[in-house]
Amino acid sequence: MDGTGERRKGVLTAHDLATWRAHWEEPLTLDYGDWTLCKTGPWSQGLMMLQSLQLLKHAGIADMQAGGVDFVHTVIEAMKLAMPTMRPIATIDFFDIPMAQPLSDDYAAQRSALITDAASLHDQRPGVIAGLDHLARPPSTAPGATAT
C-alpha cells in the first residue's frame, strides 16, 4: 500500500523475485600504487570509481597536497570525466563492451589531459569506447533528436 492506503502495483512481480538468481562475475580490477582494487562490474558505479582513480594517477594527484585546492579540483574534474562514460556502459546488457579500454593507461592519459585549471561547468565530455562512439554523443546530438 502507498501513503493513500490504496494498493499499488510495484515494478517487480512475485515471478521476478521467484525466478531471480544470483550469479558470479569477475570483478573489474585496477592496480593503483601497491594496491589492486576490485569493484563490481559495469552495471554499478565500480567502473566510474576505478576510471576516476586511473585518471587521477595520470593527472599527478600523488604530487598534490591532499585536501588542497588543486587536489580537490582535480578529483572533481576526474569524476566529471569518468561519469559520462557511464552512458554507453549502462547498455552493457545489449553490447559487448571492452572493459580494458576505459581502464587502460592510454585512455586515462588521453582523458586526464582534459583536466585544466578551469572547472568544466556544463560540458559533458563523454569518452569514446572503440566501436561504440555513437553512444558517446550527448542526447541532443543523437540521431533523431530534436534541439530544444
Image (spheres, rainbow, N blue to C red):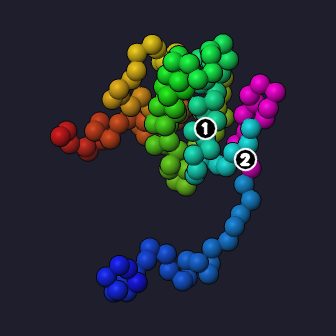
Element on which disc 2 rests: loop
Q: Which residues are magenta?
A: 26-36
Please report the residue visible at 72 percent of the width from the left and 54 percent of the height from the top.
Answer: 25
Which residue is disc 2 drawn over? 27
Q: Position of residue 64 (x, y in %)?
A: 62, 15
| Mark 2 burial class by Cα count in 10 Å: few <14, some 14-19, many 20+ | some
34 falls in the magenta region:
yes
Q: Position of residue 31 (x, y in %)?
A: 76, 30
Residue 141 on image: x %, y %: 29, 36
- Residue 21 occupies which quadrant of the picture? bottom right
Q: Residue at x 58, y 52 (%)?
A: 43
- Check if residue 139 falls in the magenta segment: no
Give me the residue at 56% from left, 18% from top.
68
Q: Amino acid at mark 2?
A: Pro
Outermost right residue: 34
Work out whether 116 lies above or below 105.
above
- Residue at 53 percent across and 24 percent down: it is 72
Q: Which mark is residue 1?
A: none
Q: Which residue is mark 1?
A: 49
Q: Quick one: label 1, few (<14), some, or many (20+) residues within 10 Å?
A: some
Left or right of residue 20, residue 77 in this image: left
